[in-house]
Image (tube, grey):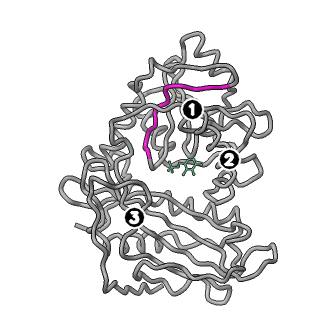
Amino acid sequence: MELRITKTKTPKQLPDDSKLGFGELFTDHMFNMDFSPEKGWHSARIEPYAPIVMDPATMVLHYGQTIFEGLKAYRTSSGMIQLFRPDRNMARLNQSARLVCIPETDEAFLLDAVKKLIAVDKEWVPGAPETSLYIRPTVIATDPSLGVRPSHTYRLFVILSPVGAYYPEGFNPVKIWVTDEHVRTVVGGVGEAKTAANYAASLYGAEKAKKAGYTQVLWLDAIENRYVEEVGTMNIFFVIAGVLVTPHLGGSILPGITRDSVLTFAKDWNIPVEERPIPIEEVVAHHESGALQEIFGSGTAAVISPVSHLAWKDHMLAVGDGKVGPIAQRFYRELTDIQYGRAEDPFGWIVPVEKA
Ligand SMILES: *Cc1c(COP(=O)(O)O)cnc(C)c1O
């Protein structure tokens, strides 16, 4: 498929690298592509960033038939722009698509389009330490119809947002609230997909946690309200007596690419790994016995997010003296070193945006 490029005649002013937040500013251009049953995916184009005008009956607005991805482009100290395992994001977009009846896209074509879009907006990739360009591919159902059924037509778009350092004040542990009232998703649902429903379902519990003074919610499974699933929009890890333990991907958990990278590192470093159901009572028991060394989340936005406190019912677990544990620290450093080109890339995870 051809890719048409139309450049803006009114470029925006570039932001100050040291004042970036998360997902508030967008670059000059976006990628768009449309789907119809007759033509399949067609009209691939890079064009000026602009609002999408929609009929109020457009399906995505009513029933949430939509999926997205989140990845980043990093600027290295030599000025190169590179992506981290982007093929995994393209593959996961298609996995998400299948679960909500959205037609799949050509992964190689989309990755190539993402690279070209970044190349068009390359001045927008910030260079200050630990900043990056966040990439948001999204697919929305576009039939103007109130019937509950999969849409016939879709729009796929990709927008780019320069984002600041996640830890501007240094690598900081967070306090987590374990909810036994709210659930994010359930096995048999769409918890494995990056689809709107899961995030809408998480807002109420997350707001309650914030009001109670916590940064994030730790979700338990929806059936027994017992097994640890995820923390906010991150996967979760425990270090228990030297073993790295994380919930297995049982259908209600998002298969994080950072999660997979952490597991790959752990195996490479000979840290024993267990992917299995983890009852919350077991976490409490390991804390009481002193075996619980570290807890941390993993995801593209924060990379690694260490947990200092876990509140569940009337238990308040203080983890590792409130400081960042050595294992979380090591994962954070080694992952970001590869992402920013400060270290070798032993697993072939890095994809340059433009060929040298
Ligand atoms: C995106 C996401 C993650 C993390 O996935 P990464 O590929 O590591 O960024 C974890 N949980 C949820 C619910 C997510 O949406």
> Which residue shows up at 46% across the image and 39% down it?
262
At label 2, which amino acid type do we have?
Tyr
Element class at badge 3: loop
Q: Quadrant of residue 6?
A: bottom left
Coordinates of residue 270 in the picture (x, y in percent): 43, 27
The yes-or-no answer for disc 1 within 8 Å of ligand 1 is no
At label 1, which amino acid type do we have?
Ile
Q: Which mark is residue 176?
A: 1
Extreme residue in the left direction? 78
Secondary structure mostly seen in the magenta stretch: strand
| Residue assigned mark 3 | 25
Element class at badge 1: strand
| Residue assigned mark 2 | 204
At label 3, which amino acid type do we have?
Leu
Which region shows up in magenta?
302-312
Viewer-nearest of discs 2 and 1: 2
Q: CA distance from mark 2 to mark 3?
A: 26 Å
Sequence-first disc among 3 and 1: 3
> Which residue shows up at 61% across the image and 37% down it?
209
Q: Nearer the viewer, residue 199 or 38?
A: 199
Coordinates of residue 84 in the picture (x, y in percent): 39, 54
